[in-house]
Amino acid sequence: MKKVQLNPVGWMSQLSQVEVSQLQDTTHSDLYDMFRNCCLAVLNSGVDEDDYEMLFAPYEDFDIKLIRRERGVKIELVNPPEVAFVDGKLVRGVHEHLFAVLRDLLYMGNKYAFMHKSAPLDSTSITDMVFDMLRHAKVLEGNDELNTIVCWGGHSINLTEYKYTKEVGYQLGLREMNICTGCGPGAMKGPMKGAAIGHAKQRYKNGRYIGISEPSIIAAEPPNAIVNELVIMPDIEKRLEAFVRAAHGIVIFPGGVGTAEELLYLLGILMNERNAQQPFPVILTGPAGSEGYFEAIDEFVGATLGKEAQSKYQVIVDDPQEVARTLRAGLERVDKYRRAMGDAFSFNWSLKIDEPFQQPFIPTHKTMSELALHHNQSTAELAVVLRKAFSGIVAGNVKAEGIKQIKEHGPFSLTGDPALMTRIDGLLKSFVAQQRMKLPGSEYQPCYTISRGK
């Protein structure tokens, strides 16, 4: 049996005795099981595998323990994956990530009662919690330079698309912009890798590669090796809010349903009339040959949310330099607006996010079948519902609880207006045809069925 003890690093190296006691109290809770699984995912950093069963199966004898010390708490790993070690020593970045998991899931999880009904539910409290978690993770400390670009895109992209994400990241890095992604492989790794090279060429010493994940997705998307700041939010809704509150601009690369979910969330917020004056640069981009992907996305957005939604983003194909230049110009407008509003550069308080975009949606066969997929509602309400539908499909594709439900009860059923369901079906089929649902080499079995109502 292999055992490895780790000294605390970062903020977790300065805990009071009461805080240590509270951490130890969590070791027999559901929250601790979540902590163990997230740590196992972190220990598999850089492994390209989106099947949680395949990832976890070899490590049934893995365990993680907290050992109390006068100055804080140590982590003890029992039978950890060898991939996390070099010549018998744990990779330093993985060491840091483990204590980030401890901070976010056990310390902050205990503070905000993630697993209980007493967790914050009203809009203001949720935003305050997102702020507090980013502040504890020190994401906000270096985020006042107005240079954080959030990059969204699929974990399952082809080599040409991956190289393009690296080139865009490189151009952003040359302009001393930092990268924040969902922390996994594919379009989440490429921009970070490219930016690291751009930062090195400019001798830019403050390169930040922020990865924001959540417990149910991290097993399918273990942190890539470039991430130097890891944050784990309690659910997808708070993860999305963390992205848009911390972002100064957003780049969206080709992706699947997860990327579509992110875009729908963002558009639903930006169409809020209270955000009408808010400059928020959003660019959809990909290499030559990806035009069909963006045409399908743009057509879907236009048909469902309308021209106003389409006006909230720009599509730039096969021009990384233009992407970076356009973002730089957009950041100047963000600077003027934040100064005029008296808003913080590090956290976008003035962005209005309505409560339906913040409330956790738990995909089940019942909740998925009850989604109001029709046009007889406002565009904001439709954006919320479409986001939930795509979020459920993500869960059925890669999240442990979603996959378990599909195995036990069959695919989720989506039903709604014939015209709307036809458009959803068409978009999803294009993702399947382009192998955007699972990593290449994995045969995709749809976790959903589409029914057209009367």
Image (cartoon, rainbow, N blue to C red):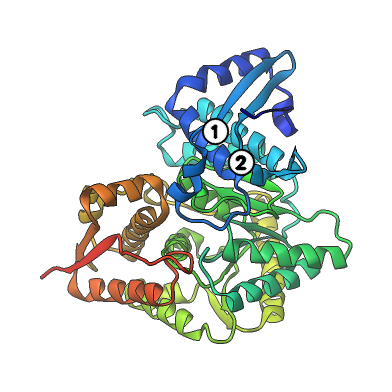
Mark 1 sits on what residue?
A: 62
* Residue depicted at x 40% and y 27%: 118
Point out residue 310 in the picture as x, y percentages from the top left corner: 45, 76
Q: Indicate the quadrant containing the C terminus: top left, top right, bottom left or bottom right.
A: bottom left
Mark 2 sits on what residue?
A: 81
Q: Indicate the quadrant containing the N terminus: top left, top right, bottom left or bottom right.
A: top right
Question: Are the residues flagged by discs 2 and 1 in contact, CB closer than 8 Å?
Answer: yes
* Residue depicted at x 62% and y 18%: 19
Whether residue 11 sits left or right of residue 287 in the image: it is: right
Residue 84 falls in image quadrant: top right
Which label's residue is closer to the chain start, 2 or 1? 1
Please state which of residues 132 and 215 is positioned toward the viewer in this rendering: 215
Residue 306 falls in image quadrant: bottom left
* Residue depicted at x 43% and y 78%: 298
Whether residue 273 sits left or right of residue 322 in the image: it is: left
* Residue depicted at x 50% and y 85%: 291
Please state which of residues 418 and 71 is positioned toward the viewer in this rendering: 71
Please state which of residues 87 and 29 is positioned toward the viewer in this rendering: 87
Q: Residues within 10 Å of mark 1 (few under 14, many from 20)?
A: some
- Name the residue at the left extreme: 454
Please state which of residues 387 and 255 is positioned toward the viewer in this rendering: 255
